[in-house]
Image (spheres, rainbow, N blue to C red):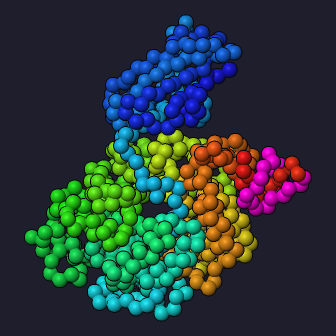
Amino acid sequence: MRILYDSKQTMYKFPFGPLVPGQSCTLNVHVPATVRASRITCILNRDGDSSSRNILLERKQRQGPYDIFCGEFSIPSPGLFFYYFFVDNSDGGFRLFKQGDDTNMEAGDLWQLSCIPRDFHTPDWAKGATYYQIFPDRFHRAGFCDLTGKLRPYTLHQYWYEDVHWQPTEQGIVLNNDFYGGNFQGITEKMDYIASLGTTILYLNPITKGFSSHRYDTGDYKTPDPMLGTEADFTRMCQAAHDRGIRVILDGVFSHTGSNSLYFNRDGAFGTGGACQDPDSPYRSWYTFYQWPDVYHCWWNFDTLPTVNKMESSFLEYIITGEDSVVAHWLRLGADGYRLDVADELPDEFIQMLRRRAHEIKPDALILGEVWEDASNKCAYGQRRGYFTQGELDAVMNYPFRTAIINYVRGIDGGKGLKDTVMSIVENYPAEVVLCNMNMLGTHDTPRILTALVDDFQGSREEQSKRHLTRNQMDVAIDRLLTASFLQYTLPGSPCLYYGDEAGMEGYRDPFNRRPFPWGQEDKELQAHFRRLGQLRKRYEAFRLGDIHFCKAQDKHLAFSRSYRGKTYFVYCNRSGDAWEIPFGQPIFGYNLQILAPDCLTIGPRGFCITEG
């Protein structure tokens, strides 16, 4: 018999997940009587503090062959904590650590416990939302845009379905300056389509003036790119979204600007000013020059992306605190929040200030961060981040879920890995953050999900430009995507659909994952599948707001429940090669499902379903 303690089960730790200051927490450890334990001490360490706190667990009762040791404590202030146990017995005692969902003597990991600010809450409208992500230049083109002021040089594709430019210049530089002309008016015209997918949040990649088609090389924070349209066009687009119950969040790129910008102006496109043109420029202090004007600190050594000094007072005023700061400017024009690009590179103080300022303007503004790992214990540049313990982010991009889902549908994992990933995030994150997390399968930074599900090709850009999925690969990819998206839309959080994934787009990493939307050439069956998923979430609150409990996660069989306000639904996935008979329930959604008798429900190979409990 083993010592039993699982922080994910409330019979051992109550309450589940993070605490708030002053909240009572109870720990119960079940020890076989044969161990002859006299007491147990929980050694609790605040991250970054060398001292520890000892919490005594005393023997309270005997249950069968187990002695139950119980202790209670609270934490006075927010922070990140780690703990293990010391078991005293007649032999002197031993330490108890974590090993998966089990315990392990003298070796293993520490358990994690977060204490979050009591007043930290996320916007109600973002809980259990359904996102649609648009790369603005590549979604839809409509009307006319005045290109006066467009940063040059650039090329404009005359034909919507021409392939993206990937070839480098003679100097070996990929300029990313080819455009298709997608714009605000085009998005507005397609708002009914966006709404038909169940969308409640529209997330746009950068929209401000920039040299490149991705616009992460900001040229002017307060001016929309001329190719996208005007501020009035942006406001009309936001109003069209709001009229359909859709909020709009923008990409906040605050770790760097473009070298070709109003602020840096390396190429002189903005006249004679700018930190690279004028040593007395008001923007000079935004940047770090090692040898002015040619040698400076830049983002990941891309000299077109000079890094900014985020805590420099004039930068903070311009971006956050000023009356017409960048944050205030776009929120007042109609935006409802921000996704913070490379949040790891923004100081905690910067994010805190941005969130406070956003809430001054819109109390329910959403602040979401680009974080690729578990954000609850993230370390970046040698520092532990306080995304949740300091109440900074309402949500993050949930890449751990993406990896776990892909591994499951590709057969790399039989189900346990997905369960462990999901429950780890659900345990480590504040409950309100879990509901708002952006659960995506494809993004502008990853291969198209259809490609990622079947092809790991790592060849050159030229090879990738010519390589497409075979008919057989496409069939396999779609089959896997049906299950992957089903999980994406039924697991806790807010699913995010990357434009065109629902239409059957394929492609490797940038720029091949950023091709124009294939209007008129969509995979209609796949579109219909995503519409059904979107409507499923709108109809059933449990999938937006409910708790999760796993019933099975092995042998490629996956089963879990989602419960909310007395209603429970069971979710089943079968990625095995055999039929799987499941407990009978009234099916409300399914694929490859058979009712063989009044009380016999079977999911065929690679099938899935939801039943009502």
Image coords of residue 566 (percent x, y):
63, 44
Image coords of residue 402 (percent x, y):
56, 56
Label count reads 0
Q: Is residue 543 visible?
A: yes
Q: Main secondary structure of the magenta part?
A: strand
Q: Residue at x 19, y 63 (%)?
A: 322
**Vertical side of 487 occupied by 231: above or below:** below
Q: Which residue range is magenta in the image?
A: 578-597
Image coords of residue 352 (percent x, y):
30, 51
Left or right for 543, reference 315: right
Left or right for 202, reference 116: right
What is the quadrant of residue 340 in the picture?
bottom left
- For this orientation, the residue located farthest to the left is 280
**Vertical side of 285 occupied by 612: above or below:** above
Q: Residue at x 59, y 17 (%)?
A: 68
Q: Residue at x 51, y 33 (%)?
A: 15
Q: Residue at x 53, y 67 (%)?
A: 199
The answer to if 177 sits in the magenta stretch is no
Q: Is residue 371 visible?
A: no
**Between 476 and 455, the one nearer to me in the picture:** 476
**Between 207 and 361, the one nearer to me in the picture:** 361
Quadrant where the N terminus sits is top right
Left or right for 111, reference 222: right
- For this orientation, the residue located farthest to the right is 597
Image coords of residue 484 (percent x, y):
65, 60
**Between 213 and 125, the one nearer to me in the picture:** 125
Left or right for 139, reference 152: right
The answer to if 581 sits in the magenta stretch is yes
- For this orientation, the residue located farthest to the top is 90
**Vertical side of 53 occupied by 349: above or below:** below
